[in-house]
Amino acid sequence: MWGVHGAKKYSKENVTNTLDPEDTQSMGTVVISLDAELAWGFVDFPVLPERRLARAREMWLELLDLFEKYDLPATWAVVGHLFLEDCDGRHPNHPLNAAWFDRERPSEHEELWCAPDLIDTVADATVDHEIACHSFSHVNFQSSRASKSVAAAELGRCHKLADRCGIELSSFVFPRNRVAHRDVLARSGFRCYRGRQPPCWHTDNRLTPLVRAVSGSPLGITPPIVHPRVDEHGLVEIPASLLLFCFEGWARQITETLWADPVVKMVQRGVDQVDGGDGIFHLWLHPNNLINDAGIKRMESVLSYIDQKRGPGLAVRTMETVAQRTVGSAPQQTW
């Protein structure tokens, strides 16, 4: 049975958020957002990545258990098509070309294209997670196929499906983080979105994997602490700070041979920096990034550290809560 999102639950987040804003000016914030998409994240791939999808449903539940273990709320940005119980791949009233939906028709893995049961687990969790929107079919909003009418249709279908379940969508995560059609997003009733990570000095460096590897060392860099802003459409932009699976393969193997997990080290630096400050440390990932037990181990370490540091100087909030506090703050107040 569907839980109704937004119902008041006793959680550390709710206790923290009842404090007077003046008492939290020196309180940093950690936000964790997830791109919950299953196979839809690869709808435009020539071949589906079997390794990423083999345990996708299992890892969704594993992650949910970890958030439950540490009582940490997160923003689950769900692809709207996953709300459907089943689908024949036909969407005659959708302005996208019918070929866009060919991958799901027919499919022997329908549970990767339709997954209301997984959304149900998030809605019914004891932790007060936010269910957000990741478009209806994971179309890149910056692509030539994504006209304003396509964007409006994607958003409208998500609202309709979520409304049936008693869920109000207020936060949006753009597919592939390609931000576009913010005017349509605002008109569709959304309040905030995840913005791009601020550019780093090593962004386009040919040695980027190596630089990122070194960042896992004791001398490494700290991910950016970000600040929300209200854009010209009245939407709150909450930039990303760090993808929790930003590099794997040989770079990870090298750093883990010399030091601990580099991503965990970067998270620890970011959490330490935002603790007692006025900014936001915004982590994000896909549940299907977790392809083995090493991924679970990383997430356990990340969430455990955040839980240890949470206190008078550090809160864990959803995107929705950050947006509410940003819009409700006086102009002179900062995070």
Image (spheres, rainbow, N blue to C red):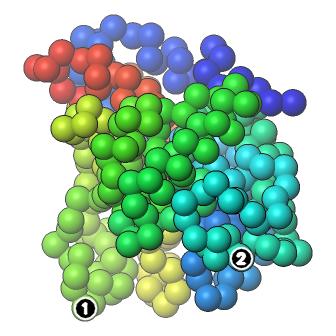
Residue 101 image position (x, y, % from top left): 67, 70
Whether residue 7 sits left or right of residue 195 in the image: it is right
Q: Residue at image x 45%, y 77%?
A: 247
Q: Residue at image x 29%, y 16%?
A: 328
Residue 287 image position (x, y, % from top left): 64, 60
Determine if residue 298 is in view: no
Q: Say which residue label 2 marks.
A: 103
Seen from this angle, which residue lies furthest left?
332
Whether residue 162 sits left or right of residue 233 in the image: it is right
Which of the image's four quarters has the N terminus?
Answer: top right
Of residues 288 and 143, the one drawn nearer to the viewer in this rendering: 143
Local SS, label 2: helix
Local SS, label 1: loop
Judge whether 131 appears above or below 210 on screen: above
Residue 198 image position (x, y, % from top left): 23, 59
Judge whether 88 appears above or below 320 on screen: below
Residue 184 badge:
none
Amino acid at the residue labelled 2: Arg
Residue 98 image position (x, y, % from top left): 64, 71
Judge whether 145 appears above or below 168 on screen: below
Q: Say which residue label 1 marks.
A: 206
For marks 1 and 2 on the same chain, the one whose residue lies earlier in the sequence:
2
Of residues 253 and 179, the one drawn nearer to the viewer in this rendering: 179
Q: Quadrant of residue 109?
A: bottom right
Whether residue 180 sits left or right of residue 330 in the image: it is right
Determine crowd level at label 2: few under 14, some 14-19, many 20+ residues with C-alpha closer than 10 A.
some
Q: Which is in the foreground here, disc 1 or disc 2?
A: 2
Count the marks: 2
Q: CA distance from mark 1 to mark 2?
A: 35 Å
Determine if residue 3 is in view: yes
